[in-house]
Every structure is written in structure tokens, then in C-alpha cells.
Image (tube, rainbow, N blue to C red):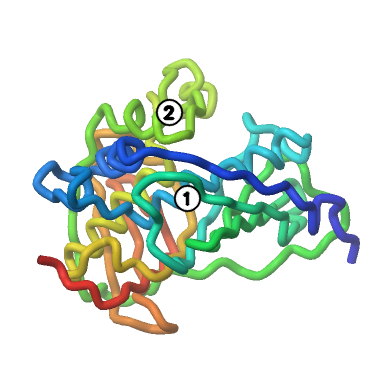
Amino acid sequence: MNAHPALGLDLGTRTVTYTEQDAILYALAVGAPAAELDLVFERDLRVLPTYSLALGRWGMEELRRRGHFDGAQALHGAQTLRVLAPLPTSGGVEISAEVTAAWDKGGAALFEVTTRSAYFEAVSTVFAHHRGGWGGERGPASRRTPEGAPGLTRTFATSPDQPALYRLTGDPHLIHIDPEAARAIGAPRPILHGLCTLGFATREIADALGVRPHALAALQVRFSRMALPGAELTVRLWDEEDGGRPFSVSSSDGEVLSGGLISFGTEVAA
């Protein structure tokens, strides 16, 4: 089968810097309450592991900048994260990015951008409309949400202002702030960032399991549907399998995050 020219593309290495205030802003943007001082207070600060996904987002943007997809016609399709070490509370993190897969979906291309650092390894999947059809392989099937009843459910609310806050962590895409841009993709108003929803869900799952979110070890998930800010979202969590616990997140319209798998270490909540 034919390989896409982007496959194996080295997207470079960057040192991404941030302050303690940036890390706290991220925590607030994914719903951390002021009472959790280890997330929002410099004295006790532990950086949420999912902040690494915001730090490494430049890899997808670099692939777009090089002309392999149109940002207005592409979606963040899926995400994995493997935590290697705790992020420092501030400073610089050297991150490399590479295109590690390119799948041909016929009318679209699916690119996997892998970002690596001393602290994490992540794979971000970009679903690029109108970029398929080169004769490549379709790729593996996505992980599915279990059909049986979950062992645990938990509902949480997002703020109507959530996207305005989350975009300050490094994702300024117009569909999250500009009503006109949101309507252009069929949304009634600006939508939540998928990574914002994932950050929320990871915190809520950790709390439900009685562990601190810093204990996150790994996760994977598919972004299935847009979520509107201010919506109530429900996490469903199943018993452990395949080295993690399957999960999904749903709004009243259906699954927002599907086929999820998450695992934590042993850091117990205070």
C-alpha cells in the first residue's frame, strides 16, 4: 500500500516554557476548585499531568503549518498520554514531535502526531477532511466503549465561560470563542475544547476513585462529539481491563468522549 509523504516526518524539537501561574491557569481551566491547594496554590503546587497535552499541542499545529491539512476542515480525533515523570512546577520542557502514522480513510486522512519529552509521551490524532484517497491502509479500528452497565457514574457541570478560560492555555481556535466561527461548523455557539473536557473528566475520575489526579499513569480516548460549555457531563467508568479502566463521557446528546481507557498509580487522595 502507498505511504503518505507525511509519514515519519520530523516536526522538530521545541523547548516549551511555562510559569507556576500558567500551570495554575490550566488547572482552573479544567475545573479545579480553589480548595484543592495542590492544584491552584504555588506553595503546594503539583502540575496536572494532562497539562502536557497543552504543552505538546504545537506538534499538530506544525503539521498544519507545513500544509498537510486545513485547520478549518480538521478535527482532533483521538488522544493518548503516557506519563513518565511529574512535570516541573515551572521552567522549560524539551518536546520533540513526529508523524508516526498516516491512515487513508477515503475521503479523509488520519494523522498520528507523537510528542515525546522526559516527562510524557503522547499521540494526538488529526482527522483531516478531503485529504484521503492516496491508496494507503485504513488503519486499525478504534477502541469501543463497553456495552455493559458501568461500575461507577459521576456527573459534573462545566461553566458557560469555560472555553474563554481554556483557550488561554494555548488553543486559540476560533470555534471556541467566536459565535460566527462556531455556526460555520454547525454549532449553535462556541464549543468546549476536547482537551478541556478530557482534563475535567480525568480530575473527576481520579476523585471518584479516591486518588489524586497527579497519580495519572496513562490514558487514551476518542473525541466523538462536540460539547457545549455549561453542559452537564456524565462520566461512566467500568471495572479494570487491559491494564486500565474503560470510561466514556456523555452529554444529553450522546457520547462526547468514547472508547476511553485510564490508569492511575497509588497516590491516595488526602
Callout 1 amino acid: Leu
Depicted 236 relative to depicted 131: above or below: below
Residue 90 appears left or right of 17 = left
x%, y% of residue 147? 37, 74
x%, y% of residue 127? 64, 47
Residue 264 found in image quarter: bottom left
Question: Residue 53: which disc?
Answer: 1
Depicted 108 relative to depicted 143: above or below: above
Which of the two residues, 145 or 65, is positioned nearer the viewer here? 65
Question: Residue 134: which disc?
Answer: none
- Which residue is located at x 81 percent, y 50 percent? 6
Q: Residues within 10 Å of mark 1 (few under 14, many from 20)?
A: many
Which mark's residue is nearer the viewer, 1 or 2?
1
- Quadrant containing the N terminus is bottom right
Mark 2 falls on what kind of element? helix
Callout 2 amino acid: His
- Residue on which the image places disc 2: 176
The residues bearing labels 1 and 2 have C-alpha atoms spaced at a distance of 17 Å
Mark 1 falls on what kind of element? helix
First of labels 1, 2 by sequence position:
1
Q: Determine whether label 1 and label 2 are within 8 Å by CB.
A: no
Q: Residues within 10 Å of mark 2 (few under 14, many from 20)?
A: many
Name the residue at the top extreme. 180
Which of the two residues, 59 or 154, is positioned nearer the viewer here? 59
Residue 41 found in image quarter: top left
- Which residue is located at x 44 percent, y 18 percent? 178
x%, y% of residue 11? 73, 47
